[in-house]
Image: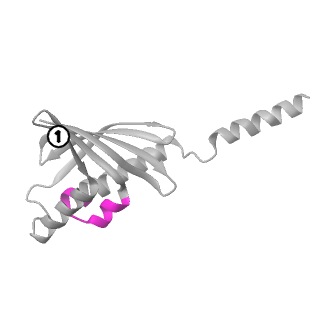
């Protein structure tokens, strides 16, 4: 009976960890998605393929404009980026840098706090929501405040 209980415990514990990457791997993957799709794709390079790889197609940017909720879908943000690229605005005169002081992961959900810097100036603080899909981590939502 003790052998069966010990074997069952090992199986149950093993099942609890199956399919989940170690937290350090998840954190590195989340950082990579943010820096590739957001910093490089949308801000510094204008590469919409990078954006499509890292942002979920149903992504929404939420903010406040004139005391009302403003919503920007990723498809619209991509169109704006393509227009800027066509106008020769990439790379920008002042590159965007991002500091990620917080990444909090629970299962397949995560939130990242992003200090959005233009040069050395802290311009925005973003809060990104991410979900882990079969294809990896995707940015699904953003709220922010200006500085």
The residue positioned 13% from the left and 71% from the top of the image is 86
Camera-side residue: 70 or 38?
A: 70
Left-right relation of 9 to 1? left
Q: Quadrant of the C terminus?
A: top left
Camera-side residue: 76 or 42?
A: 76
Q: Which of the 4 image quadrants contains residue 128?
A: top left
Magenta span main SS:
helix
Magenta part of the chain: 41-53
Count the marks. 1
The location of residue 41, given as percent across then percent down, is 26, 60
Q: Residues within 10 Å of mark 1 (few under 14, many from 20)?
A: some
The location of residue 34, given as percent across then percent down, is 32, 50
- In the image, residue 60 sits, relative to residue 48, either above or below, namely above
The residue positioned 36% from the left and 47% from the top of the image is 140
The residue positioned 47% from the left and 43% from the top of the image is 24
Left-right relation of 124 to 31? left
Left-right relation of 51 to 65? right
Left-right relation of 14 to 142? right
**Pointer 1 residue:** 124
């Amino acid at each position: 009976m003790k052998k069966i209980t010990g074997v069952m415990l090992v199986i149950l514990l093993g099942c609890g960890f199956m399919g989940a990457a170690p937290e350090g791997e998840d954190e590195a993957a989340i950082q990579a998605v943010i820096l590739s799709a957001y910093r490089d794709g949308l801000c510094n390079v204008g590469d919409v393929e990078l954006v499509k790889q890292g942002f979920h197609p149903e992504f929404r940017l939420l903010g406040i404009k004139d005391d009302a909720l403003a919503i920007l879908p990723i498809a619209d943000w991509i169109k704006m980026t393509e227009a800027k690229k066509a106008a020769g605005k990439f790379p920008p005169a002042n590159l965007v840098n991002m500091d990620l002081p917080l990444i909090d992961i629970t299962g397949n959900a995560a939130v990242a706090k992003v200090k959005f810097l233009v040069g050395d100036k802290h311009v925005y603080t973003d809060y990104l929501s991410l979900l882990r899909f079969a294809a990896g981590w995707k940015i699904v939502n953003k709220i922010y405040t200006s500085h």
